[in-house]
Amino acid sequence: MLLRVYRNQNADGDWPQWFMFFERERNIRPCDSHGDIVFWPVLALAQYLLASDDATFLDELVPFFHAEGDAHAEHATIWQHVERALGVVATRVIPGTQLARTATATGTTRFSRWILPCASGCAAHGP
C-alpha cells in the first residue's frame, strides 16, 4: 500500500489531493493538493517504520508519478521521496511558528523530531 501511495507522489514532492487506485485510471487526478495531504503519506511511513523496524524499506526504488507511465518517470528511493515531501512542507510553513522551525532543520532532523514522535503518539489511537 505504501509503495502504491509513493508511486503517486508528484516529482515536485507533493501528492495530488486524491488519485485513483487502479493503473487503468492513473491519469484521473488533480495536479496538486491543499491542506495536510502531504503529511499523511509521511505519517503512514513513520508508523510503518515504527511497527516493522524495517529501515531497509527506505531504500526501495520507486518512481514518481508520470502521466505516461513508470518507464517515463524519475525513480528515487523512498527516503528521497520523503525528502521531497518535507521540502514541500518547508515551503508551506507559517513564519514564526513551531512548524517553521521544524521545517528549516535538516531532513533527518525533521523526520525524527516531528514525524516519528507524531507517529508514535498516534499509533495507539490511529491517524
Image (cartoon, rainbow, N blue to C red):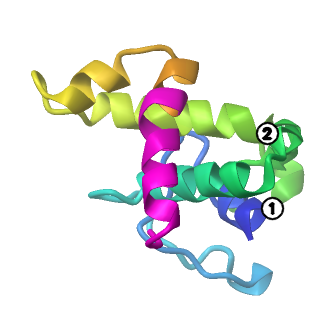
Task: Specify whether 101 is left or right of 37.
Answer: left
**Predominant SS of the magenta segment:** helix
Tag 1: amino acid:
Gly
Residue at figure coordinates x 14%, y 32% from the top left: 94
Residue 61 falls within the magenta-colored stretch? no
Residue 119 falls within the magenta-colored stretch? yes
Tag 2: amino acid:
Leu
In what element is the residue under mark 1? loop
In what element is the residue under mark 2? helix
**Of the image marks 1 and 2, the number of the one nearer the N terminus:** 2
Q: Quadrant of residue 28?
A: bottom right
Q: Magenta residues?
A: 112-127
C-beta proximity under 8 Å, tags 1 and 2: no
Task: Specify whether 101 is left or right of 48.
Answer: left
Please tell me the numbered disc located at residue 69: 1
Report the residue that reaches farthest toward the left: 96
Q: Position of residue 16 (x, y in %)?
A: 47, 62
Task: Specify whether 51 is left or right of 18.
Answer: right
Give above or below for 117 relative to 18. above
Q: How many marks?
A: 2
At label 2, counting other C-alpha atoms closer than 10 Å, the crowd grade (few under 14, some 14-19, many 20 or more) is some
Q: Position of residue 68 (x, y in %)?
A: 76, 61
Whether residue 31 appears in this view of the structure is no
| Front residue (pair 48, 79) | 48
